[in-house]
Image: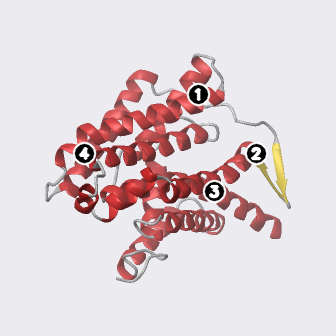
């Protein structure tokens, strides 16, 4: 029983690391622009496919593939902001419009990926072969790298937001766009940077996830839903709350799979999200309204 519980906790840490990287990207866009990017999961898929193409089809190696997938996803994210979001700045229905435009971008990217790469399953090699034992639980070395890498990436984003002029500009724009413009911050550029950074996180997550799961045009749908649950559960607009909620949700999901099975776990997670929205609209880690 103890061995099973330890293995479940380790599995929850792996899930939490992936959710933290995905949800932090959503949080960056929401904090800066106040909108949800529903193409976030599709950008993760693009990062995985580009990484596979560069690494396996072209043969340049996995690290070059991961870097390429991250860069291409970031560029597509900037294009989405420029073509599908920026034209609606200032529109009183901007939130609803961007839901539709980013959903359209998601569909375009998924169908485009199916046309380019086909529907056949693909998978990337692992960063490191072998296994690591944690107490009585055993995980792959690749998953162990994810568990270590995710907090480092989140810490880097936090330092970027707090210590750099660009990060401070993003925070200022998120707090008050008009005041930020008055002190000389280029608001549209800040929006583009936020989308690019968010998309880069999605692409990196997809490239790393492509070594654990099969790469398909729809591989980003489930992680997107889980990332949205994490962001709502933790509280919108806070990177720290998002990171904490990601690990909580990862552990809860792993325990639910152990106790209830795969069938009922999504139901319970969505039920938790609804309860949080009703009683704590600002999230578990957010302040009361």
Location of residue 268 in the rendering, given as x and y in whole percent from the top left corner = 49, 69
Between label 3 and label 2, give the one nearer the viewer.
3
Q: CA distance from mark 2 to mark 4?
A: 40 Å
Q: Quick check: 223 left or right of 58?
A: left
Badge 3 or badge 4: first in the primary sequence: 4
Q: Quick check: 48 left or right of 13?
A: left
Q: Which residue is mark 4?
A: 85
For label 3, the SS is helix
Q: Which residue is mark 2?
A: 140
Q: Quick check: 148 left or right of 170?
A: right
Camera sees residue 1: no
Badge 2 or badge 4: first in the primary sequence: 4
Camera sees residue 241: yes
Badge 1 or badge 2: first in the primary sequence: 1
For label 1, the SS is helix
Between label 1 and label 2, give the one nearer the viewer.
1
Q: 135 and 78: which one is in front?
A: 78
Q: Residues within 10 Å of mark 2 (few under 14, many from 20)?
A: some
Between label 2 and label 4, give the one nearer the viewer.
4
């Amino acid at each position: 029983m103890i061995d099973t519980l330890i293995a479940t906790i380790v599995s929850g840490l792996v899930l939490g690391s992936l959710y933290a990287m995905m949800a932090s990207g959503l949080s960056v866009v929401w904090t800066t622009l106040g909108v949800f990017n529903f193409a976030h999961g599709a950008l993760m898929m693009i990062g995985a496919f580009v990484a596979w193409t560069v690494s396996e089809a072209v043969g340049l190696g996995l690290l070059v593939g991961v870097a390429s997938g991250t860069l291409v996803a970031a560029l597509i994210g900037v294009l989405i902001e420029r073509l599908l979001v920026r034209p609606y700045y200032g529109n009183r229905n901007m939130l609803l419009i961007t839901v539709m435009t980013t959903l359209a971008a998601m569909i375009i990217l998924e169908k485009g990926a199916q046309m380019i790469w086909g529907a056949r399953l693909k998978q990337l090699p692992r960063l490191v072969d072998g296994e690591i034992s944690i107490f009585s639980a055993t995980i792959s070395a690749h998953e162990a790298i994810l568990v270590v890498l995710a907090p480092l990436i989140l810490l880097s984003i936090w330092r970027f937001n707090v210590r750099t002029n660009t990060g401070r500009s993003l925070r200022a724009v998120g707090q008050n766009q008009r005041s930020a413009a008055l002190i000389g911050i280029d608001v549209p550029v800040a929006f583009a940077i936020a989308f690019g950074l968010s998309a880069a996180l999605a692409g990196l997550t997809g490239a790393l996830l492509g070594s654990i799961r099969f790469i398909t045009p729809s591989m980003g749908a489930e992680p997107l839903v889980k990332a949205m649950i994490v962001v709502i559960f933790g509280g919108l607009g806070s990177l720290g709350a998002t990171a904490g909620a990601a690990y909580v949700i990862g552990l809860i999901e792993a325990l639910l799979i152990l106790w209830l099975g795969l069938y009922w776990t999504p139901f319970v997670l969505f039920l938790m999200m609804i309860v949080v929205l009703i009683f704590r609209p600002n999230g578990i880690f957010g302040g009361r309204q």
